[in-house]
Image (tube, grey):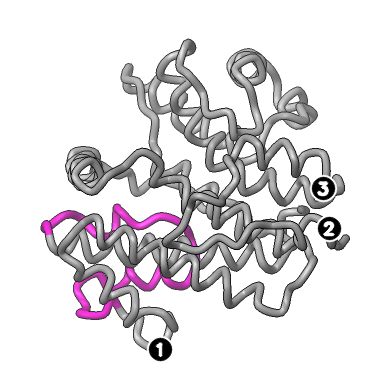
Amino acid sequence: MNYYSFIAGLPDITPDNAKDAPQMDALLEELDALLSDRDKRLLKLLRMRYDNENLTAYLADKNAVLNSLGNLTADDWEDIIGILENGTEFMEKHEPRLIPYMAEYYHSTHDTAQDSGEDRHDEELLSTLYYDYGMRCSNKFIAQWFEFCLDLNNILTAFTCRKHGWDIKGAIVGHNEVAETIRKNPNARDFGLKGICDDFDTIVSVAETADLMEREKRIDALKWQWLEEQTFFEYFSIEKVLSFWLKCEILHRWDGLDTERGKSVFKGLLAEMKKGLTFDDSHTTPNRKQTEN
């Protein structure tokens, strides 16, 4: 399906100018009224990143304020967690609100927590399941976007771990060629990625950026460039619409952050990463059937 009027009326946004970008809630409301059911499922897949955040927040605190950009509300989570806790496999399979990989995540972490007597929310496992799920999408643009982001995040993570002496293999998420190559070659200068990852040299230059604010800006620029290249010949398609959504996400993550506040946030993220680097090698690789989206 093509979206001529919507795309023709989009504001001209750039990485350095967020003032014309619509707010995400307003954009979501507009797209919900515009997109076909098939295309809504593609947007839903992108929005699952917020469902991931909301799931871990809800499991930690049932009164937590959830991100409204997620597909599921607090009432949905209450019902779903109840099914996961007390239901049967049949009920799980036929619950339309239940995102498939989240059942695997819940049972993995819940069973481990029961065995150890400790609360355990493994965000690395959740990220792995989400990336693997996204890369199975039947829409080429979506599948490649997930893989690009996975590769970018894993390469940057590998260099950060090397710099601070942290475990590299345990920090890598997902199950594609780049992820497995890094795990097999954690001590190689290039992690074995020369000739495998086309953007490797560019990502290395980003990883070597000392200023955390500048580093994050360069990461956003890489993502923006990828979106531009992948949709250059797309004019009124769903891919162009989804690209606009992703660009707005990139712009709005800087809302309310000035330079000093931004530096403080990124230093905090780095500290949290160091604090939370405990990994479990027992994660299972999901079955790689194509996701029907």
Which circle marks residue 195 in the picture?
Answer: 1
Residue 127 screen position, x and y as percent: 46, 47
Residue 287 screen position, x and y as percent: 62, 54
Can you see residue 126?
A: yes
Which circle marks residue 27 in the picture?
Answer: none
Secondary structure at badge 1 equals: loop
Above-or-below relation of 279 to 77:
below
Q: Amino acid at mark 3?
A: Leu
The quarter holding residue 205 reads bottom left
Q: Is residue 111 left or right of residue 276?
A: right
Q: Is residue 251 left or right of residue 40?
A: left
- Label located before the other in sequence (2 or 1): 2
Residue 40 screen position, x and y as percent: 77, 46
Which circle marks residue 35 in the picture?
Answer: 3
Specify few, some or many for label 1: CA neighbours under 10 Å numbering under 14, 14-19, or 20 or more.
few
Instruction: Please identify, in this view, whether the residue under mark 2 or under mark 1 is nearer the observer.
Output: 2
Instruction: Please identify, in this view, whether the residue under mark 3 or under mark 2 is nearer the observer.
Output: 2
Determine the residue positioned at 45% across, 28% down. Answer: 56
